[in-house]
Structures are given as structure tokens and as C-alpha cells.
Amino acid sequence: MIKVVNLHKKFKNLHVLKGINLEVKKGEVLVIIGPSGGGKSTLLRCINRLEEPTEGEIYIDGIKITDPKIDINKIRQKVGMVFQLFNLFPHLTALENITLAPIKVKKIDPKIAKEKAYDLLRRVGLQDKANSYPSQLSGGQQQRIAIARALAMEPEVMLFDEPTSAIDPEMTKEVLDVIRELAHDGMTMIIATHEMGFAREVAHRIIFLDQGQIVEEGSPKEFFENPKEERTIEFLSKILSV
Amino acid sequence: MDFNINIFIESIPYLLRGALVTLRLSIISVGIGVVLGLFIGLARISKRYIFRIPATLYVEVIRGTPLLMQLLIIYYALPSFGINLGAITAAIVGLSINSAAYTGEIFRGGIQSIEKGQMEAARSLGMSYFQAMRYVILPQAFRRILPPLTNEFVSMLKESSLASTLAVTELLRAGREIVAWKANVFSPFLGVTLIYLLMTLPLTRLSIWMEKRLKTSD
């Protein structure tokens, strides 16, 4: 489904990703953990080319998306993204946030788009907030709308960039529940997160990304119970002792 | 003090006719300026040199030289290249070109003030750059630039008085004509002053009000 080959990303003198190789199968949930600044966000952002890779190749469904001739807007329709800061459109209602791209990009009939949006709102438990503006919603609610917005394009893959980092602790559960359900339904997902309990529960596979490299990779059980690399052990001991 | 109430009252209808010309000049010029300014603003933030460099050059040249000089060049120098514009047209062309540079900067600032995540979210949904601009960035930017755009219109109401040098009988020139006819300086100019204030003050207040409302809604 997704294949990343020798991916490098440099910002001027900063070498953020140093040769990432990665494969995600259809229906797989890959969780990326690692310290802030380790390259988690950059890796996700390269996969839908919000960042241009400096070197290397990325394939989605066998299509080389790092090819400069590719229509990136077509590719992005297949790759949903959820941001740390939600990035909902503040001038639109929750419903309009969800229907905008289906109507304008996919040219779906507004009536049908609206019906679908209501289904999605129900799915994230916010059917009563259809006409609310983002500023009237809590962080957890906004993030759930953002997930619904991404799902409205019927993506084949979902990328989550620390979806709960900017949300009050008591609201994170409602967001994680939605993601959990997506995992159940077989959605292919790559999730960058600091929620270790959630990572362990929802991931099929975990990678530990530090200083732009994949330090360790394994099943959640192996990864948390029997980490092999020193840096992983150090990171886990720090984060789990909190 | 040569104030004369009769001259003052007599001059009002003529001044109002001049004020209408001032209004018309300003509305048309800012209108054209806004349309051109949108493209200049977009070009100014473009990643492509072929758009960015000419737009930057345009803005710098227009903002770095006197409006009066620009008007004089258009009215008096263009005819030697075979381009003859009437006084009103020349004034509108000059004021529009000038206004476009300033509104271009207003648009640039407004667009750049929208959080980067908005463009990213729109693009991540598969929107093209222009779709994202049109449906996500510009609607938000428009609200933010409404106050400075109103201020730009207020400046235009005042600066269009320079068109009086091109023999366009707008408000200021209407006043000067009465001064010449009646040999009375103060009375007509008091009328001119009051009419300018009548046009600009409500708009200035409107701009302040909009700014306050924006702050509370953000």
C-alpha cells in the first residue's frame, strides 16, 4: 500500500530524515513513536508531499508519488491527514468543513455530500454539532470533525500527526475512540503519537524514530516488553516512568 | 477672516457636484485597485520569480514615487507616445494604478496572516492551490483586510484631490473655482473641508468598528 525507499529530508543544514525505508500493508496500523524533533511529523508530511522529499522515493498503491510529473492533488485525495492543531476552516460550519472538498474537488452533488457528512458526524458522535463553527467546539470535538473531514474524501490511507497532543487530557479519549474504531474497520493508518497505551493497543507494528532514523521496529508486544536498542530502552524508560 | 455665510451657502450645491466626482473617482479607482491588487498580492507571495519580481517592482515603484508625479506622467507625458487620455480617464488610470499597489500589499498581508495550517489542510484534502485560495484562504483574509481596505478608500477620497491638477473638477477643484469667482477663500474651503470630513469620518469609524468586531470574533 505504502512504500518508502531511502527517504531523506533536509531543511537547509538540518538533516531531518536520514534514509527512511518503510512499508505499510493494506489494513495495517503503523504507529510511529519517538522524541519530538525526531522526524515523525516530517515523515508523515512527506507521504502526502506537504513536504518535498530531498531524496528517495515514495509509492502509494504502486504509484510513485515522488515523481514530479504526478498530479499530487489526485494522490492527496487518497491520503487523509489529521493535524496536531486540527486546522479546521474557521469560517465554515462543521458540516461545511466536511463537505467542502467533496463538493469542490470531487464534484459530488452537494445534497449527497451533505448526507454523507451527516453519516460521518454520527460516526464521530457529533451529529448535533453540524451547524457549529469550530470556535464553538472543544479541542476534542474539533479534532473529531477534522477526522470526519478527512474521511469524507474516502481516503485509502489516513495519516495522523500527533492527533491528541493539543487536546486536554480528558478529551483525548473521545478522539482515540474514533481512531480505534477506524482501525477496527480495517483502515490503513500511520499514526504519530505520544500516547503509549493507545499505541500498544491499536498498532499492528510500531517504529521508533529518532534523529531521522528508524531505530527499532516491531510488534507492540516485542517493542514494549523486549526493546533491543539502547535508545529505545532509554526513551521508553523516560516516557513510561512519567 | 473673510467668512461670508451667503457665499458659503451658495457654494454648497456646486461643491456637492464636485464631491460626487470625488466619490466616483474613488469608488472606480479603488474598485479597479482591489481587483488588480488581488493579483498583485498573489504574485507577491508566489514562489515563481516571473510573477514575484515584476509585482514587487511595481509595488516599490508606485509606493516610492509621488502620486502627483504619476498623474502628471499619465496625463502630460503619455500623449507624446500617442496615448491620449481625457482628464477623467487619466485620473482614474493613475489613481487605480496607485491604489492597486497599496491594496496589493493589503492583500499580501491579509493572506500571509492566515495560519499556514489552513493551506496545508486544504491541500491535504486534494484541493489545488487556487481552490485552497478561493475557498479557504481568501474568505478568511477578506474579513481581516476589510478595515485596511476601508482605510485605503478613505485615503483615496483625500488623495483623489490631486486629480484637480488634471483639470478634473472634483471637490477640491470645485472649491478653488468658487474661490476664484467670488474672491473669497475661506467660505468655499470651509465647505470643502466639511464635505471631506462628512465622507471620511463615518468610514474611519466603520473601519475601527470592524476591527474591534474582528478582534472579538477571533
Image (tube, coloured by chain):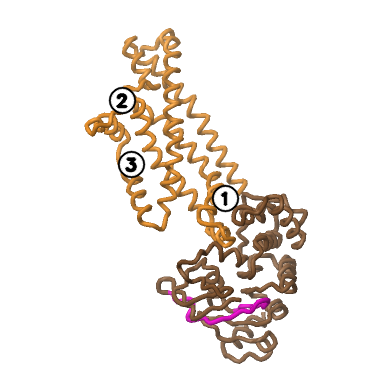
Which one is in front, B190 or B86? B86
Badge 2 is on which residue? B166
Colour that chain B carries in the picture: orange
Q: Residue at x 45, y 13 (%)?
A: B13
In the figure, is residue B53 to the left or right of A203? Answer: left
Q: Quadrant of the N terminus of chain B?
A: top left
Hey, what amino acid is under mark 2? Leu
Q: In what element is the residue under mark 1?
A: helix
Estimate the x, y position of residue B172 in percent, counting from the top left.
37, 22
Answer yes or no: are tags 2 and 3 on the same subunit. yes
Badge 3 is on which residue? B62
In the figure, is residue B43 to the left or right of B218? Answer: left
Question: Residue B11, which numbered label?
Answer: none
Estimate the x, y position of residue B143 in percent, counting from the top left.
55, 44
Which one is in front, A203 or B218? A203
State how far apart marks 2 and 3 are (Cα): 19 Å
Q: Residue at x 58, y 46 (%)?
A: B215
What residue span does the magenta drawing correspond to?
A: A14-33
Circles 1, 3 touching at the beta carbon (< 8 Å): no
Q: Is residue A155 visible?
A: yes
